[in-house]
Amino acid sequence: MGNQRTLNLRFLAEPADVNFGGKVHGGAVMKWIDLAGYACAAGWSGRYCVTAYVGGIRFVSPIHVGNLVEVEARVIYTGRSSMHIDINVLACDPKSGDRRQTTHCILIMVAVDESGHPVSIPEWVPETEEDIQLKDTAIKLMDMRKQISDEMAILFGDRT
């Protein structure tokens, strides 16, 4: 199954996923994002993968119990052992089929061996103009994360 770049998970939002306000809680959505990111990264690399980063998460609209939820994941950049995964969460009433975006973010997953050490993965090479733009965006976001990390180290000191 290696080198599968995209993955879609589909399921119904259940009552156990709801917060006190009657909508699916963010923690449930983040779990779904992590599951789709893992499956996508493992499908691309053919390896066990761990989450290294979740960023830019935006909760755009609520998900309700009974909504059909679709979590779309796709590789948009690869490093030596890491994969940047674009995640888009959509929801709809299964009776109407009108899909709407509910959440979006970027995940970075790292392929590891049995000892937990990073291992090399196949490179993803963009082929379309959209893919080139996605890769360029991933690179810009990496630079921004580095700047944020540097600022956080200044503010809070190195706590590693």
Image: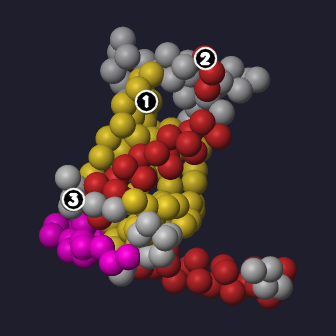
Count residues near mark 1 (Cα–Cα under 10 Å), then give few for <14, some for 14-19, many for 20+: many
Furthest residue toward front:
115
At which x and y percent is residue 17?
61, 26
Marks 2 and 1, the one that precedes in the sequence? 2
Instruction: Name, please, the residue furthest toward the right.
Output: 156
Distance from the alpha carbon under mark 2 to that under mark 1: 13 Å
Which label's residue is closer to the chain start, 3 or 2? Answer: 3
> Is the Cβ of the residue at disc 2 closer than 8 Å to that at disc 1?
no
Q: Which of 42/113 is in front? A: 113
User: For the point 36% across and 24% down, which residue is it?
Assistant: 98
The span picked out in magenta is 119-136
Q: Amino acid at mark 1?
A: Val
Q: Position of residue 156 (x, y in %)?
A: 84, 80
CA gap between label 3 and label 2 equals 35 Å
Determine which residue is flagged by label 1.
69
Identify whether 141 is placed above or below 95.
below
Mark 2 lies on a secondary structure that is helix
3 or 2: mark nearer the eye: 3
- What residue is disc 2 on? 15
Foreground tag (2 vs 1): 2
Give residue 154's position: percent from left, percent from top.
Answer: 80, 88
| Amino acid tagged 2 | Pro
Q: Point out which mark residue 2 bears.
A: 3
Rendered view: 22 above or below 120: above
